[in-house]
């Protein structure tokens, strides 16, 4: 969870008025969610599914399908901003939504871990 929180904090430090930072914000927020999901799945299943395609389903089984779906959608968005030469038309809104969704998912992961007796 520490790594997840650090990625989210880094994304929050990026200047959102600089267009070049927007893809990085989306990417860092995805990785915040990814590492939080890994922490939950590791604790619940005692396995570390670091596969980006399989992790959303595993998270969905641990916290509920909406969280797995959320992680899966941001994986796709991260792939687009990292690898496509054509940014989405709504990149600025996407970057803001990434921060919001990352905060939501990390909070759900922290709460899920706390319910299982993990102190953070």
Image (spheres, grey):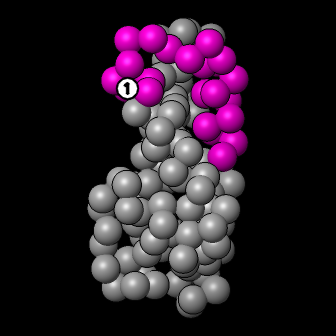
Q: Is residue 89 magenta?
A: yes
Q: Residue at x 69, y 23 (%)?
A: 93
State the count of labels.
1
Task: Specify the segment rendered in magenta.
Answer: 80-101
Residue 13 placement (x, y as % from top left): 54, 29
Front position in the image: 1 or 52: 52
Front position in the image: 39 or 117: 39
Q: Quadrant of the C terminus?
A: bottom right
Q: Residue at x 64, y 72 (%)?
A: 64
Q: Is residue 27 visible?
A: no
**Figure check: 104 above or below 38:** above
Front position in the image: 12 or 22: 22
* Left or right, 101 with reference to 30: right
Residue 83 placement (x, y as % from top left): 34, 23
- SS at circle 1: helix
> Mark 1 highlights which residue?
82
Residue 31 placement (x, y as % from top left): 43, 46
Q: Is residue 74 visible?
A: yes
The quarter of the picture where residue 88 lies is: top right
Q: Main secondary structure of the magenta part?
A: helix
* Left or right, 93 with reference to 75: right
**Figure check: 82 above or below 45:** above
Q: Residue furthest bottom?
A: 117
Residue 40 placement (x, y as % from top left): 48, 73
Q: Residue at x 67, y 62 (%)?
A: 66
Q: Is residue 53 magenta?
A: no
**Figure check: 17 above or below 104:** above
**Alpha-carbon neighbours of circle 1 within 10 Å: few (<14), some, or many (≥20)?**
some
The quarter of the picture where residue 68 lies is: bottom right
Q: Residue at x 66, y 17 (%)?
A: 90
* Left or right, 29 with reference to 111: left
């Amino acid at each position: 969870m520490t790594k997840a929180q650090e990625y989210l904090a880094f994304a929050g430090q990026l200047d959102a008025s600089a267009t070049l930072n927007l893809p990085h914000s989306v990417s860092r927020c995805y990785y915040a969610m990814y590492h939080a999901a890994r922490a939950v799945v590791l604790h619940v299943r005692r396995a570390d599914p670091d596969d980006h395609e399989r992790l959303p389903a595993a998270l969905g089984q641990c916290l509920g399908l909406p969280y797995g779906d959320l992680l899966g959608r941001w994986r796709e968005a991260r792939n687009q901003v990292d690898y496509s030469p054509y940014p989405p038309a709504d990149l600025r809104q996407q970057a803001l939504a990434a921060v919001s969704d990352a905060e939501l998912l990390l909070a759900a992961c922290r709460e899920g871990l706390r319910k299982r007796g993990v102190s953070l």
